[in-house]
Image (tube, rainbow, N blue to C red):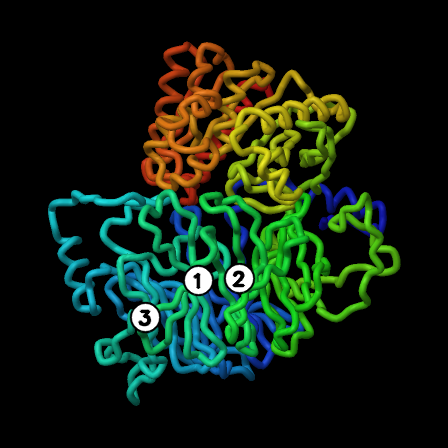
Amino acid sequence: MRRFLIAVLMCLVVVPVFAQSRHPFTFEDMMKLKRVGEPEVSPDGKWVIFSVVDVDLAANTKTPHIWIVPTAGGKEREIITDQDADRPRWAPDGKRFAFLSTKEGGSQVWIADFDGTAGTVPAVHQLTRIATEADGELWSPDGKNILFTSNVYPECADESCNAKKLQESEKSKVKALIFDRLLYRHWNAYKGEKRSHIFVIPVAAVQPPPGTNIVDYETVPALDLTPGDYDAPVFSVGGQDNYAFSPDGQEVCYASNHDKVEATSTNNDLWLVPVSGGPAKNITADNPASDSTPLYSPDGKYIAYRAQTRPGYESDRFRMMLYDRATGEKKNLTEPFDRWVDTIAWSPDSSTLYFTADNEGAAGIYVLKLGRRWPREIVSGVNDDLTLTSDGKFILFTRMSVMAPNEIYRAATEFEPCRVEVMGGDPLRYDAIDCELTKPQPLTRMNDAVLSKVDMSPMDWFWFKGAASENVQGFMVKPPNFDPDKKYPLKYIVHGGPEVPEGDLWSYRWNPELFAANGYVVIFINFHGSPGYGQKFVDAINGDWGGAPYEDLMKGLDYAEQHYSFIDKNRECALGASFGGYMINWILGHTDRFKCLVSHDSTFNTESQWGTTEELWFNHWEFKGPPYDNRELYQKWSPHLFAKNFKTPTLVVHGQRDYRLDVSEGFQLFTTLQMEGVPSKMLYFPDEGHWVLKPQNGQLWYKTVNDWVDHWVGK
């Protein structure tokens, strides 16, 4: 894990001045930070292009821009200054790149000319003018086409039909919707009648006539590669693309779910379709569970992808699979590797796969050569967004820690290999005897100016015996100017998911440094159900929501109180969102050890939550079916049935547009607290979903939450 240490002190006189120049981290500091996106290396290997989101707190906006930095290192520069610009993707010749912009209204694909000598953009041209907007653009390797996605009406055969239906919908005074299937709403929006489809458009459409930068889009219509009443690609809240071009540019592989009831299915399959259009071929029909994130090998022989094996279980282990395009054979490359494969990348010579995987609070980068059985970690820390230079000598990626948001790093792929000593029979825990892992070097330092003025503490971690006497990992962040001889109140954070691990990572939503900044110790636990400790550890939460995870949290807190004398056990508050919110509600009915609680976007009544959520596969797996088939398990773990035990002052937070956990859950909780005479308050966001994303809403959220905790712990 990364640690920020002061290695050399210039002189004793300088140190107090330096320390005094720093101040505790504030929400306003956090909004000044630039949010760095994934790196894209130019074909000649000289440049790295990436997006950066700037937050304007006063204007309540987030705006993406495109920056560039030399691959060899140097100063970063913004290269498109007169419009918003996001998701840059290089053309194969390196003389242009595609990007997304809302300059002309909705999101559209644009093309920028690029001067590779100066590293500048002489001109930009708009490529798409599609009424239903364009997203997720990708340049074909042969340079002839650009792929993009758009939410369209599946019954429409052309752009004019989509434009007409969209216009009619916008002008109609009747805003009612009619549903005839499940997943009528998803995450934070009602799906209505539209589906996500994949389109291709010839890049020639962007060649402007002499003297103009505008092209008549109607003369070069985009081709819908995935017509029909299905989403292609499948919905995703982030991560790697669920579609890819073949190296010759003649084929697209994408993920789509064609099961009848999508709300109960995780059966995403991979499909192949020619760029010229035509029937799609399902290449993973033999797997009833999820197949996703396809990526062709550069030589065109294989498609690497991630797969699960248990249908309906969104938190099954993600394995690295290899599909042989010539024979159709599929191989599981990571069966002995008991961690989730995340972001993947090919080496240019198609001999090696690189990937990230959660492991004990970190997300290292691993390398797996084809034909080898076991991957090897080459970069520690918390990393993502992998890409390689064209010569394969360097891997580039984003890296974060609890003390700093994403920056772009570079590391050599060839270095002296470590002699590994296996500890306790677990190949994932080892000592490097004679060497170190490859040493990453930062390419960007976008946030040094802000962070250099802020006083933060590095993350510590500890292990304790949790449920079933198994080892469980906890993490701690101390307040600025920490004094071990003093007593500090505690904020005890319960993570969501539940299969989403905590660790040495940055968050704009539940930021440990920001929670610690006003004089608190912050602790969070990777209880049973958290990835990074083997699939058995993840599976332990199934059907046992208030069992092992609750036991882990209580034992973890016991351990911290016993081993860290600076924690004031009489001034503790527990906070959580999503599953963390559920656990706060469970704690509310099962212990009075906390002075206050914060429950954000929670499950309060497991039976009513089943009827109002959208992704039913989650409830069906965790509670073994719908409540009318297995009511006993739903009631066993439903916090609302323990309302007579509620005593702890509780802040309830919920967003109207949260369709994962409907706002009615928050209203039920607040109503019950009020009826039982428990001190309580509700923060309601009519314009937010599962996450609070608007800057000023986030400011109100942090103030309300921290004020609530301050009030009840007697700070």
**Label 1 packing within 10 angstroms: few (<14), some (14-19), many (20+):** many
CB under 8 Å between discs 2 and 1: yes
Specify the quadrant that holds the C terminus. top right
Mark 1 residue type: Leu
**Residue holding disc 2:** 305
Relative to 196, residue 656 above or below: above
The CA distance from mark 3 to mark 1 is 13 Å
Residue 3 x %, y %: 73, 48
**Residue holding disc 1:** 270
Residue 176 x %, y %: 16, 43
For image coordinates 59% across by 42% down, the residue present is 501
Label 2 or label 1, whichever comes before in sequence order: 1
**Residue holding disc 3:** 279
Mark 3 residue type: Pro
461 or 84: nearer the viewer: 461
Label 3 or label 2, whichever comes before in sequence order: 3
> Is residue 451 in sight in this rendering?
no
CB under 8 Å between discs 3 and 1: no
Residue found at the very far bottom of the displayed protein = 210
